[in-house]
Image (cartoon, coloured by chain):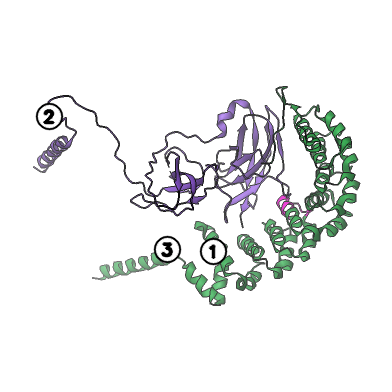
Amino acid sequence: MVRPCVLGLLLILLLCAGCRQGSPIDLESLKGRARAGDAAAFRQLIELLSVSERNLNDRVYPLILELGEPAIPFLLDAVNTDDRIRREHVIAALGTLKASQGVEPIGRVLGDRTLQRRYVAAWALGEIGDPRGIPFLLSALGDEDDEVRRYAVRALIKLNREAVEPLLAFLRTASARGTAGAVRALGDIGDSRALAALLQRVDGPARQDVLHALGKLKDPRAEAVLIDGLSDADWQSRMNAAMSLGALGGPAASAALEKAVEDEVLVVREWAARSLEMISGRHVKYRNEKREYVLPYSIYH
Amino acid sequence: MRRCGCLLALGLSFLVVAGCGEREPEGEGRMGQVSGRILAPLEGATLYVYKKGMDLYGPAFAVSRATGPDGSFDLRLPAGDYVAMARKRQNGDTSGPVVAGDNKSEILSFTVAGDDQTLTVVAPIKSGDERRLTDQALATATGLSGTISDADGNPVEGARVHVYDHVQMSERPKYVSEKTGPDGRYLVYLPEGGTYYLAARDKFGGPPKLGDLYGRYDQGTIEPSAVVVRSKEILQGVDIRVTKVW
């Protein structure tokens, strides 16, 4: 009599345990409670951002974005969490929601080189677009993590003209790594205020980037320096010079590019032909690997 | 006794099945051939509708809901000329390459002029694989290799490198690598050297969506970095980091 009772009890316990383990989280209900202002529901949703199993955090993240501005204070509370995955999602949400209150805490995360996944902090500062984020992004241009540097460049480009003067000031004391990032950002922003600073650095360690960036400024005052770049010993510098001259070159550039169409490196010949066409408006052929003279294809649709 | 009963039942079944089989009709005179196919409705297929002239490998103009058990679909479209294809991928994806084992219809052309119309779409199972996979270019000995890693710098399994020859990278990739293994390594063979632009992602087809893993080979600039590959060279160390699309 005792044995069946014990067995029955065990079965009930097992069932209960099984139910608890498998019970799905009702995300819609949590979202509904959060929408009604339930702080605990907001916090629970943000906790779930660390759960990668079954892509749970991928399902929670859009819900938080849907909740919008009311979620921001709770996200700000969680910016400094030790959980790198939750922190990544929290910062991404603050960026997507363009929460300018997040600039300082996100900037501090970006600057803390002991933390992982800091790239998202640079990304978020670009999305928020608040100039108070610029100093953090400038520091990140010299970061050891190339992903952080990449996103910092992108964010500064998004901040656009607001970032030009700070970038120029930063260049005066920047490391070689920081200089390369700043030059790339200035090139894509395309503001003529950057011309003098770029020309000053054309013989420095960021030469390839400078030659590329000068083309994006489209300022004819860079023509002589770029023509000189066509004779560089480094083929990538020659390629960048050839590429840039198409955007700003005149008759002198055309003459130099005519010679570059016979460069020993295929891609330099190809870019020289492409740029000559841009300057002169006539089709220019170059010699391909099979020694056939062909037209360059348009890299744009 | 029980064994005998089973054998008897088995024998009877064979007889019944044989009786239900194909039978030549009895009769006199000339015989004519009647042949064809009996088709069953396809559940879980999607109809992709494109405006005439659109790239059938790019995003569709309109996409139906997955068909139900009766294979039916229903779409409302503005007047115009269209082409459509039905596809059903075994992996459940709604985009990406159609590979052997998936269902794929022929291209259907139709015009919508404000009236209702009914299409019957035949989507047989694809037996070959026409993806432009890179091993087809193996003999060239030209290509790219590297590692795809995640936000922590760990290798990503199951991602592909997409290779473009246009800087906007908005068209269909020119070449696509095989999926990476656990070491995140990829190797793309190319038919010739040239200037290429790269992206790595865990999904195939359409623009990257929220939560997808995606990364471009660039240095943060608006345009991707050009990767120059020389003929007869496998350019190594072209590593790409993927992060979630936020």
Q: Report x, y in % for residue B112.
A: 45, 49
Provide the residue span drawn in magenta: A141-151
Crowding at dot 1, Cα within 10 Å, few <14 / some 14-19 / many 20+, comes out as: many
Residue at 71% x, 22% y is: A292
Which residue carries the number 1 mark? A60
Q: Is residue A232 above or below residue A112?
A: above
Q: Are marks 1 and 3 in contact (CB under 8 Å)?
A: no
Residue at 26% x, 68% y is: A4
Tell me where residue B167 sits by quadrant: top right
Q: Is residue A46 above or below residue A141?
A: below
Q: Report x, y in % for residue B92.
A: 45, 48
- Which chain has been coloured purple in this picture? B
Q: Chain of mark 2?
A: B
Q: Is residue B219 visible?
A: yes
Query: Mark 2: which secondary structure?
Result: loop
- Callout in the foreground (3, 2): 2
- Callout in the foreground (1, 3): 1
Crowding at dot 2, Cα within 10 Å, few <14 / some 14-19 / many 20+, comes out as: few
Identify which amino acid the numbered label 1 is placed on.
Answer: Val
Q: Nearer the viewer, residue B49 or A214?
A: B49
Identify which amino acid the numbered label 3 is placed on.
Answer: Gly
Determine which of the numbered discs, if any, sits on residue A22 in the image. Answer: 3
Q: Is residue B88 visible?
A: no
Query: Mark 3: which secondary structure?
Result: helix
Identify which amino acid the numbered label 2 is placed on.
Answer: Glu
C-alpha gap between disc 3 and disc 2: 63 Å
Q: Report x, y in % for residue A275.
A: 79, 36
Q: Residue furthest left?
A: B1
Crowding at dot 3, Cα within 10 Å, few <14 / some 14-19 / many 20+, comes out as: few
Residue at 90% x, 50% y is: A196
Which residue carries the number 2 mark? B26
